[in-house]
Amino acid sequence: MSATVKPFYCLRCGHRYRAEHEKGIVVERSCPKCSSNSVRLVPQEGAGRGASTDDD
């Protein structure tokens, strides 16, 4: 697998930034602004849980 650059955000200060991400590999991340380790990948629209489907 190859790493791609994905958007991340900090839950503590709200800072958004881009960093390399490889699916299936867990990496401890810290915010470059406040050093918090509460960093999450920005969810892609229409992907994952909560995505709506039209089954009518």
Image: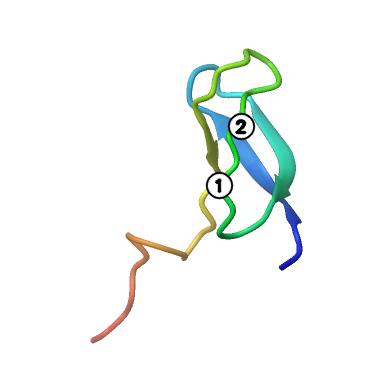
Q: CA distance from mark 1 to mark 2?
A: 9 Å
Question: Residue 55 sits in which quadrant?
Answer: bottom left
What x and y, as percent, mark residue 32? 70, 21
| Farthest left residue in view | 56
Which residue type carries mark 1?
Val
Question: Mark on residue 26?
Answer: 1
Looking at the image, residue 14 sits to the left or right of residue 49; the answer is right
The residue sitting at 41% across, 63% down in the picture is 48
Q: Is residue 12 above or below residue 49?
A: above
Question: Mark on residue 29?
Answer: 2
Which residue type carries mark 2?
Arg
Looking at the image, residue 2 sits to the left or right of residue 28; the answer is right
Question: Mark on residue 50?
Answer: none
Q: Quadrant of the C terminus?
A: bottom left
What x and y, as percent, mark residue 19? 73, 41
The residue sitting at 55% across, 44% down in the picture is 41
Q: Nearer the viewer, mark 1 or mark 2?
A: 1
Looking at the image, residue 6 sits to the left or right of residue 53; the answer is right
